[in-house]
Image (cartoon, rainbow, N blue to C red):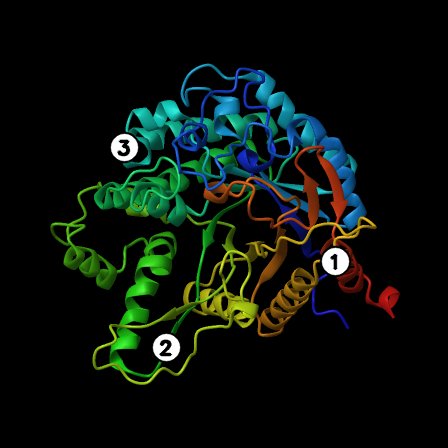
């Protein structure tokens, strides 16, 4: 018997900059990723999203692929500069019309649209004013949320404010690995706060325009494991969890930042005191505006080790190369069940979704055109099983989105990493279902109608 409810959302996902292309169509403005990709060495293969998967022009074919795979939900993002070129001024109706066409195509195919407002491609004009490190960007985002939810609220119920604020703040403003490429720890902390504040303020705006709105936020969460039982490894785990997970979960659900993580930032010199300079009275209550669901993006776990000197013997060994994806991430499906159960137990969200879960493998078509991505097939099977385990333990899991529908522009890796269950020949834009897509189709069918799978 299937462990999944009948109304479970079986989906796949993409993001605008990674798949759309058409960067100069309809008045679309420059995004921070357009600018960042032009910096020598910023993207591994020197590429950008100028064409990507040409989803802007080929979305009807891609919706047909979704029907073939059998998903009932599609998570995609809106390109902010396609709606407001400079982030603030004139509304670009050509951009809104594109998303109306996409949504209509999905609904006609019986596929539920699941919209993300911010998947990293902020207008460059806003970054020129300070970006997410500036409080002014909060107001710009809330207006953007107002414009889009007014336009699509009559046909889209499911809304995400931000995708992975940790990545935007830490990778974009602290390490410089992502756009806008800044290396300013203090700015990163301000950016994280302003992202959360923009989320909290946007939630009631979206609800005002959407009947029976279903609004949430997506976090990339990583379950941590102490490498051994030593005090130094347990302390490394505490620090990691505070920095990566609780810095975002605690404000959303408890209306406060974790005291121990604040103290860690002071010790690191990223804050001058435990008084957070970017927090204004009333901010935390707005950030904690109740949400309808929380999305978790899961890819792997973290093994936390302290300094070597005086540490206990290692208990958890480093995974072998064969246990890792092309990103160097360990394949660890138990971690998905663990993070779902932990969030349910500690934060009790009304509902949970696995909004991204996937693996990068560079399998190419063979001489017969088949893409036998054996490793990804195993990945999909085991992670869907982890979802079933979480459901059996009482987790209110409402959906699973496999990342990604298409091979696409993989941020700082360019086109060197392939996450898709559909292979894309970037020279011709030919799409080919991989074996993983067919296995996912069969899993969906089996869990949707178990009798038909016998």
- Please identify the quadrant where the C terminus is shown: bottom right
Q: Residue 1: x and y, percent?
A: 77, 73
Q: Residues within 10 Å of mark 3 (few under 14, many from 20)?
A: some
Mark carried by residue 348: none
Mark carried by residue 134: 3
- State which tag comes first along the sequence, 1 or 3: 3
Mark carried by residue 227: 2
* Vertical position of residue 249 compared to residue 103: above or below: below
Q: Residue 381: x and y, percent?
A: 68, 66
Q: Nearer the viewer, mark 3 or mark 2?
A: 2
- State which tag comes first along the sequence, 3 or 2: 3
Determine the residue positioned at 59% across, 61% down. 397
Q: Is residue 379 left or right of residue 304?
A: right
**Residue bearing mark 1:** 372
Determine the residue positioned at 75% across, 58% down. 444
Alpha carbons under labels 1 and 3: distance apart = 47 Å
Disc 3 and disc 2 in contact, CB within 8 angstroms: no
């Amino acid at each position: 018997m299937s462990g999944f409810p009948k109304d479970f959302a079986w989906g796949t996902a993409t993001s605008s900059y990674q798949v759309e292309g058409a960067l100069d169509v309809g008045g679309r403005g420059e995004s921070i990723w357009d600018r960042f990709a032009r910096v020598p060495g910023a993207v591994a293969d020197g590429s950008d999203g100028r064409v990507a998967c040409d989803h802007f022009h080929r979305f009807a074919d891609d919706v047909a692929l979704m029907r073939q795979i059998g998903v009932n939900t599609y998570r995609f993002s809106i390109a902010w500069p396609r709606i407001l070129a400079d982030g603030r001024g004139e509304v670009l109706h050509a951009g809104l019309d594109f998303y109306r066409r996409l949504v209509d195509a999905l609904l006609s195919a019986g596929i539920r649209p699941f919209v993300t407002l911010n998947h990293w491609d902020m207008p460059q004009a806003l970054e020129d004013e300070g970006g997410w490190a500036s409080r002014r960007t909060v107001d710009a985002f809330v207006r953007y949320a107002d414009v889009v939810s007014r336009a699509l609220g009559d046909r889209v119920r499911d809304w995400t404010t931000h995708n992975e604020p940790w990545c935007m703040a830490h990778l974009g403003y602290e390490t410089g690995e992502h756009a806008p490429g800044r290396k300013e720890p203090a700015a990163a902390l301000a950016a994280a706060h302003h992202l959360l504040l923009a989320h909290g303020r946007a939630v009631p705006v979206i609800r005002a325009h959407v009947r029976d709105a279903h609004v949430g936020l997506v976090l990339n969460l990583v379950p941590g494991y102490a490498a051994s039982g030593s005090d130094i490894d347990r302390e490394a785990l505490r620090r990691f969890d505070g920095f990566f997970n609780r810095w975002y979960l605690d404000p959303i659900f408890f209306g406060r930042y974790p005291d121990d993580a604040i103290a860690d930032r002071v010790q690191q010199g990223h804050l001058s005191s435990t008084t957070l300079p970017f927090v204004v009275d009333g901010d935390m209550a707005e950030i904690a505006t109740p949400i309808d669901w929380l999305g978790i993006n899961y890819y792997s776990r973290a093994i936390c080790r302290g300094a070597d000197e005086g540490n206990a013997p290692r208990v958890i060994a480093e995974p072998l190369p064969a246990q890792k994806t092309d990103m160097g991430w360990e394949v660890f499906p138990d971690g998905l069940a663990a993070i779902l159960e932990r969030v349910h137990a500690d934060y009790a969200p009304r509902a949970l979704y696995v909004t991204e879960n996937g693996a990068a493998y560079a399998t190419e078509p063979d001489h017969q055109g088949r893409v036998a991505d054996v490793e990804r097939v195993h990945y999909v099977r085991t992670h869907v099983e982890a979802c079933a385990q979480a459901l059996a333990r009482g987790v209110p899991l409402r959906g699973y989105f496999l990342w990604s529908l298409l091979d696409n522009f993989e941020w700082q890796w360019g086109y060197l990493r392939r996450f898709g269950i559909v292979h894309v020949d970037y020279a011709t834009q030919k799409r080919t279902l991989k074996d993983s897509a067919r296995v996912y189709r069969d899993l969906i069918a089996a869990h949707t109608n178990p009798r038909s799978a016998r």
